[in-house]
Image (cartoon, coloured by chain):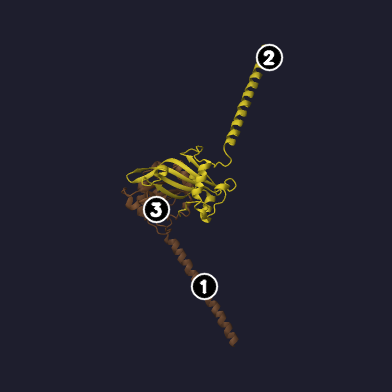
Chain colours: A brown, B yellow
Amino acid sequence: MSIHKNARMLISFANRRRVIFLALAAIWIVTWSLSLWAMPNDAVPYPAGYRQWARVMSALVGPKSPAFALHGGIHHVYANEKAMEGYRTSKFPDGSVLVADFLETRESAGITTEGPRRRIDVMVKDSRRYPDTGGWGFEQFRGDSQTDRMVTAQIATKCFACHAQQKERDSVFSRFRE
Amino acid sequence: MSIHKNARMLISFANRRRVIFLALAAIWIVTWSLSLWAMPNDAVPYPAGYRQWARVMSALVGPKSPAFALHGGIHHVYANEKAMEGYRTSKFPDGSVLVADFLETRESAGITTEGPRRRIDVMVKDSRRYPDTGGWGFEQFRGDSQTDRMVTAQIATKCFACHAQQKERDSVFSRFRE
């Protein structure tokens, strides 16, 4: 009898482990689905690997500029290969990604070097997802974060209102510096 | 008779053209061979397409710096893919190419932008060709020129004497700015 009882206990223990595993798996699947659902379909993805892309141009916003408080420091614009095609043709194909990288600067004995990252500004071309803003999606990521997003739908509309001035260059201000 | 005479003249004219063509071709081949012979075997090639390579780091040399006269302006360092491996491992494989791009700057209302190119400095890793300078070949190209070379063998020795301080980093000063 005690052998049978032990066997029953073992089976029951194995069953319980299976139930716990299935319950955890179900919770994980639900959480993951919700997280996908929570991210809007038009969210601009973080531009992984952009630091290896071609540098388009750079500029330094110094303390004498009225833009210093918001944009002070050095910024570099990067383009993926599709966006490089856009600089050549003034028509950026879907899949073009532009990144403006804003870094603080440090000055010592007349030499200015790059400090911590303030934020990156991202533009992604996708005519179907962003029909209301010239086919461009706009986003900003704070500091080095890949998830701390700063742009709301309202802000994106403002981004585009300004970029739209560059109609003949597909809403892009920067130019590739040879 | 006159028909025969005309035919002879035509043949003679065709022959003369052929002789002139062959003579010009011979002169061109000799000139080209001499130009190859004149360029030393250890000449550092112009780094075609470096503006599309990954940007390693940037710095700005301002008027307050004692280096301003020679190096004033913004400079960007670029690395080809093999050199990018070197930044990760501190050992730069043969075929690594580093380019420091020196641009003048313009300042207006606190915004500093990129001006004309002063020169580019090039380092090429080739252990067999440059055994006396840590495996690195050094060159500078003036302005936008791909042929106006500024580095003599004597200067290259000086370049290396300074770079050799970075022994544990394979004679490279710059670091990749993530």
The residue that disc 1 covers is: A21
Q: Position of residue A128 (x, y in %)?
A: 44, 50
Mark 3 vs mark 2: same chain?
no
Q: Position of residue B146 (x, y in %)?
A: 50, 38
Mark 3 touching mark 1, by CB under 8 A? no
**Closer to viewer: mark 3 or mark 2:** 3
Numbered disc 1: what chain? A
**Residue A12 in view in this figure:** yes
Disc sitting over residue B4 in the figure = 2
**Closer to viewer: mark 3 or mark 1:** 3
Disc sitting over residue A31 in the figure = none
Q: Nearer the viewer, residue A38 or B116?
A: B116
Outermost residue toward the top in this view: B1
Q: CA distance from mark 1 to mark 2?
A: 105 Å
Outermost residue toward the bottom in this view: A1
The residue that disc 3 covers is: A103
Q: CA distance from mark 3 to mark 2?
A: 84 Å
Mark 3 Cα within 10 Å, few/some/many (few <14, many 20+)?
Answer: many
Mark 1 Cα within 10 Å, few/some/many (few <14, many 20+)?
Answer: few
**Closer to viewer: mark 1 or mark 2:** 2
Numbered disc 2: what chain? B
Q: Element type at marker 3? A: strand
Seen at 46% across and 52% down, the residue is A51
Rendered view: B115 above or below A100:
above
Q: Amino acid at mark 1?
A: Phe
